[in-house]
Amino acid sequence: MVPRIAKKRFSQNFLRDGRVVADIVEAGNFSVTDTVIEIGPGYGALTNDVLKKIPTLIAIEVDRDAVQYLRSKFSEDRLTVIEADCLDIDLSVLGSSLRLLGNLPYHISTPILFHVDAGINSIKDAMFMLQREVVDRLVASPGSSSYGKLSITMQLNWEIEKLFDISPEAFHPKPKVWSSILYLRPRAIAYDVDRLTFRRIVFGAFSKRRKTLRNALKGVVSEEQLECAAIDPGQRPETLSVDDYVRLSNIVSQT
């Protein structure tokens, strides 16, 4: 039996709307040959319907009570449950061309996204349910209020799409915010850039978001390097595109 009280320390909000579940599974377009990894299945709202499309599924769940429930409900030959924090799992050991799925805990959604980003070479695509505000940041364009280091860091490696929004009414307990379904697919042609340099510049720029690049990147990037990249040192960090940051990173790496 699924408990009525969600555990706050796990940021649990259980999906209970069957129509939303059906929409998510349909959007996943799963095939019988897919290796699907569900992160944070909870008590199996998605798990049950996904297993109608594919023969086996791997689930990563940190809540021991949920783990016990899943193991009692689904046979071992259909569902493999890994009791662990997904941040502690090397995704590459689970296979290649992984298809990730999950209703991510809102309080650690950004660390999970960065963890997924680090494992990109093993991933075919990913579909996550997240707080709508976070999804809007991920798909944001330069110059918008939602655009920032999360947008740029993830857009470097991924093609990102917002599929649809989900009302708080679809969950128990009801969260105070709307959710959205996010779709991630590795870029077909990866950017040629040193990732560490890129990340250092982007995080440095947004550590002082309201300052100009000249001031925000002082000690990291010279004014000459900005000008060499055809970037006005008087611009603010949120006005630069991913291409701009890649171009600047390559100049810094080469000088």
Image (cartoon, helix red, strand yellow):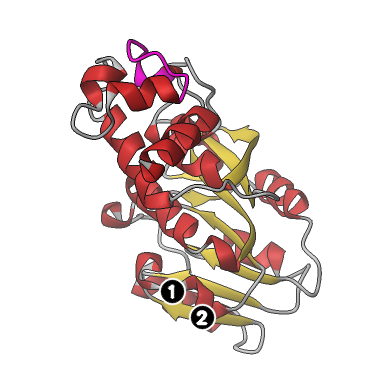
Mark 1 is surrounded, within 10 Å at the Cα level, by few (under 14), some (14 to 19) or many (20 or more) other residues, namely: few
Q: Is residue 220 visible?
A: yes
Q: Residue 241's x, y, as percent?
A: 51, 25
**Mark identifier at residue 90:** 1
- Seen from the viewer's position, the closer of residues 2 and 249 is 249
Q: Is 4 left, or right, of 214 in this rendering?
A: right
For residue 106, above or below residue 37: above
Q: Which residue is mark 2?
A: 93
Element class at badge 2:
helix
For residue 230, above or below residue 199: above
Task: Residue at 75% x, 79% y: name it.
Answer: 55
Whether residue 233 appears in magenta in the rendering, the answer is yes
In this view, the residue farthest toward the left is 219
**Mark identifier at residue 253:** none
Mark 2 is surrounded, within 10 Å at the Cα level, by few (under 14), some (14 to 19) or many (20 or more) other residues, namely: few
Query: Number of numbered discs present?
Result: 2
In this view, the residue farthest toward the front is 255
